[in-house]
Image (cartoon, rainbow, N blue to C red):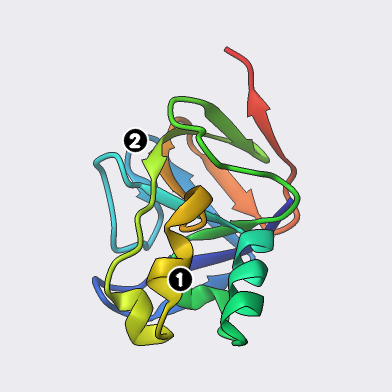
Amino acid sequence: MVKAIWIKTARRGAMKASSRVRCITDAGLEGNANQGGKRQITIIEEENWQAMMDELGADLAPWQRRANVMVSGFPLKESKGRVLQLGEISIRIEGETRPCERMDEALPGLREAMKPEWRGGVYGRILNDGTLKVGDTVHWREE
């Protein structure tokens, strides 16, 4: 299930929570700073986030990961090339989102904690126009 949605307002800018967002084919999320290219949307797993917070003894808000979407109950590890269905939106997973130094700015040790098991999440391309909403179902689409 889609648990949360965030829009990056500017490069290195604030993350704004939203209950829904319009997705634009091969561009990205409406209003998001990152548009076009392979990294049109970024997705993290709630369970991985919580595991990292437990390991680090922290309670950092998940928006500080700077991903666009948080899903729950759905593993994303080693999914490059697969098509993820979030409600009515199809996303081709292009790869693992590798953590940058900004993660340690948010919480020392977070960058290293994200490295194994694709815990930093995934990024992908938007394959169709539509609206993504908190509460949408999540599944892999068979091609």
Instruction: Quickly name the residue at label 1.
Output: 65
Task: Locate residue 41, reporting x and y percent.
Answer: 42, 50
Q: Is residue 15 left or right of residue 90?
A: left
Task: Locate residue 60, reporting x and y percent.
Answer: 56, 84
Q: Given contact means CB atoms under 8 Å apart, are the residues at marks 2 and 1 in contact? A: no
**Badge 2 amino acid:** Asp
Q: Is residue 19 left or right of residue 16?
A: right
Rendered residue at 32%/46% (across/down): 39
**Vertical position of residue 24 compared to residue 57: above or below:** above
Task: Locate residue 86, reporting x and y percent.
Answer: 63, 41
Q: Residues within 10 Å of mark 1 (few under 14, many from 20)?
A: many
**Vertical position of residue 129 compared to residue 112: above or below:** above
Camera-nearest residue between 81 and 28: 81
Point out which mark residue 47 bears.
none
Rendered residue at 45%/47% (across/down): 122
Q: Secondary structure at mark 1?
A: helix
**Badge 1 amino acid:** Arg
Report if residue 121 is visible in the image: no
Rendered residue at 28%/51% (across/down): 35
Q: Is residue 11 left or right of residue 50?
A: left
Instruction: Quickly name the residue at label 2.
Output: 26
Camera-nearest residue between 92 and 27: 92
Determine the CA span between mark 2 and mark 1: 23 Å
Camera-nearest residue between 60 and 141: 60
Report if residue 30 is visible in the image: yes
- Pick whichever of labels 2 and 1 is earlier in the sequence: 2
Q: Is residue 21 left or right of residue 87?
A: left
Rendered residue at 34%/35% (across/down): 26
Q: Secondary structure at mark 2?
A: loop
